[in-house]
């Protein structure tokens, strides 16, 4: 073994530092935008804007939902806002402060295998999943970045199991910091931390992980103490009634969509708003050629990855590794079904590194084989990049345009119109729409209506302008369409996830 291999962050790299920095800058420029926040992001922004920790905690207790179960992220974004402000671009750009260090750790962990390093880093840097959530002011980038650090540490220790533990202090520190970061990012991530723990048990020789535990027991003990306190906090939030909104339960479509999103299909298919509106498999018909071509390349690369892993690990260890990956995910899916909570790909952000490592491993294996293998690898790269760029630039993948909807509401009120806001309240507050609640929207006012009854609509008068979003969430009784038809409202314009209606007699 090379003596340098035992040093922290030692090893030559095929990807030169200047090229790596250039790629990081490219991803930063492409992935993060200043477009309108959507619903969940406005909650993040409002929490970040609070002037003091006490004010932030008070709002957190009022919001309920899942936000109180993201303690580390909420504290982090609150501190960042005090330095960089609360604009859309700023609160998203801080995601890079997690993502880039994670990639640097991964780069070092994979340095001795230069082809694999380039393949896995490429899969991570240009991941459609990563690009989508880098552009979202929520905890998902924190989750998949800290998880990536954990898997990078495990990769190093599995590959270099004979290293003396004394030289692993830096890596143990990274591992423990990543554990705290992942578990502190959300309750769901704390459940999924079982995955890297089980992977470590399968991949690392018992003597190796036991020596790491023994040699650095103080670091591990401190980490376990923090994790215990986080666990107690999460139990308290559950006891207090904090949990994600139960919009729908688990169905086979949700389970399939998790793999669809983590593996990078999303940009090649229909937009999320179209999927949410329904339409079944017919929605995928226009995108079928690209999706099928990508599915072929992904299946082939995963097959190559598993074949190589079987040779390296043996059949029994590979099956044990598969169990380590599947069991925690299965438990989370079962909990989702029991609690009637719709679980999506983003809730499995902590497992994204598994997809990246497998795709990168398969990409490297295909490239080494030459011929058909290189053709498959090249096809995957083209479609993978197309998916990421589509998520970034295609109109069908745009998120709810609360900023434009708020501008219309404010403009209407400023011109003396009466306005109804049938959308999320937090979005209106962040974009400074002067909402009133209850009663009738008088001239120059914006009345917030959520899940109104027929009687509520009848008592609220006839507004000049009605701004409608996501009827499955904000008009669950389904009374608004009949009201619009009966009172002769006409659709004035569409915004992403919004319809703007005007009264035909008040134009």
Image: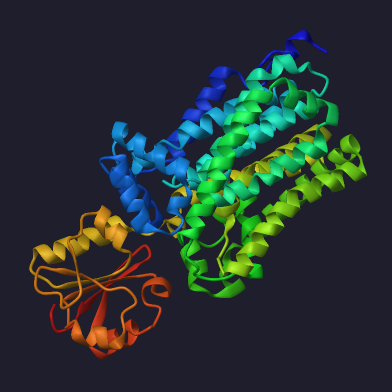
Q: Is residue 486 left or right of residue 294?
A: left
> Of residues 111 and 47, which is closer to you in this image?
47
> Of residues 436 and 445, which is closer to you in this image?
436
Q: Residue 427 in the image: x percent, y percent?
A: 30, 58
Q: Residue 22 in the image: x percent, y percent?
A: 50, 25
Q: Residue 246 in the image: x percent, y percent?
A: 50, 68
The quadrant the C terminus occupies is: bottom left
Q: Is residue 166 visible?
A: yes
User: What residue is at 48 percent from the left and 61 percent from the top?
Assistant: 244
Outermost residue toward the top? 3
Looking at the rendered structure, the number of numbered marks drawn on it comes to 0
> Of residues 110 and 240, which is closer to you in this image?
240
28 in relation to 3, above or below: below
236 in relation to 424, above or below: above
Outermost residue toward the bottom? 486
Q: Is residue 317 left or right of residue 465?
A: right
Q: How is the structure coloured here?
A: rainbow
489 in relation to 315, above or below: below
User: What residue is at 40 percent from the left and 78 percent from the top?
Assistant: 476
> Of residues 320 and 461, which is closer to you in this image?
320
350 in relation to 493, above or below: above
Q: Is residue 183 left or right of residue 465?
A: right
Q: Is residue 107 visible?
A: no
User: What residue is at 38 percent from the left and 83 percent from the top?
Assistant: 478
User: What residue is at 63 percent from the left and 63 percent from the top?
Assistant: 335
The quadrant the N terminus occupies is: top right
Q: Residue 382 in the image: x percent, y percent?
A: 62, 44
């Amino acid at each position: 073994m090379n003596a340098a291999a035992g040093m922290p962050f030692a090893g030559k790299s095929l990807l030169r530092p200047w090229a790596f920095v250039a790629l990081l800058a490219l991803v930063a420029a492409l992935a993060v935008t200043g477009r309108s926040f959507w619903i969940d992001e406005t909650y993040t922004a409002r929490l970040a804007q609070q002037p003091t920790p006490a004010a932030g905690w008070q709002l957190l207790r009022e919001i309920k939902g899942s936000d109180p179960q993201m303690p580390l992220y909420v504290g982090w974004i609150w501190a960042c806002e005090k330095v960089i402000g609360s604009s859309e671009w700023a609160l998203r750009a801080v995601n890079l402060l997690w993502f880039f260090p994670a990639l640097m750790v991964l780069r070092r962990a994979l340095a001795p295998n230069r082809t694999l390093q380039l393949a896995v880093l490429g899969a991570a840097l240009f991941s459609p999943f990563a690009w989508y959530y880098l552009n979202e002011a929520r905890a998902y980038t924190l989750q998949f970045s800290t998880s990536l650090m954990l898997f990078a540490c495990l990769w190093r220790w599995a590959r270099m199991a004979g290293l003396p533990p004394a030289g692993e202090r830096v890596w143990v520190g990274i591992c423990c910091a990543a554990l705290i970061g992942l578990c502190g990012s959300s309750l769901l991530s704390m459940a999924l931390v079982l995955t890297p723990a089980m992977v470590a048990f399968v991949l690392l020789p018992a003597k190796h992980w036991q020596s790491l535990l023994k040699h650095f027991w103080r670091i591990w003990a401190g980490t376990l103490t923090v994790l215990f306190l986080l666990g107690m906090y999460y139990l308290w939030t559950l006891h207090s009634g904090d949990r994600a909104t139960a919009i729908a339960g688990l169905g086979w479509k949700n389970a399939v969509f998790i793999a669809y999103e983590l593996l990078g299909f999303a940009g090649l298919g229909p937009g999320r708003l179209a999927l949410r509106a329904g339409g079944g498999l017919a929605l995928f018909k226009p995108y079928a050629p690209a999706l099928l071509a990508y599915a072929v390349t992904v299946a082939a690369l995963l097959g190559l990855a598993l074949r190589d892993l079987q040779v390296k690990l043996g059949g029994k260890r590979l099956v044990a590794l598969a169990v380590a990956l599947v069991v925690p995910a299965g438990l989370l899916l079962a909990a989702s079904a029991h609690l009637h909570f719709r679980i999506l790909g983003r809730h499995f952000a902590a497992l994204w590194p598994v997809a990246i490592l497998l795709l990168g491993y398969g990409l490297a294996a295909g490239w080494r084989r030459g011929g058909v293998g290189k053709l498959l690898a090249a096809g995957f790269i083209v479609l993978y990049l197309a998916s990421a760029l589509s998520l970034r630039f295609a109109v069908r993948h745009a998120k709810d345009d609360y900023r434009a909807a708020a501008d219309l509401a404010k403009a209407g009120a400023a011109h003396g119109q009466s306005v109804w806001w049938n959308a999320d309240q937090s979005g209106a507050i962040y974009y400074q729409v002067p909402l009133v609640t209850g009663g009738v929207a008088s001239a120059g006012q914006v009345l917030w209506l959520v899940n109104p009854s027929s009687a509520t609509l009848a008592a609220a008068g006839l507004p000049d302008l009605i701004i409608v979003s996501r009827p499955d969430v904000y008009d669950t009784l389904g009374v608004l369409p009949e009201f619009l038809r009966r009172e002769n409202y006409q659709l004035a314009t569409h915004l992403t996830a919004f319809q703007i209606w005007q009264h035909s007699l008040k134009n």
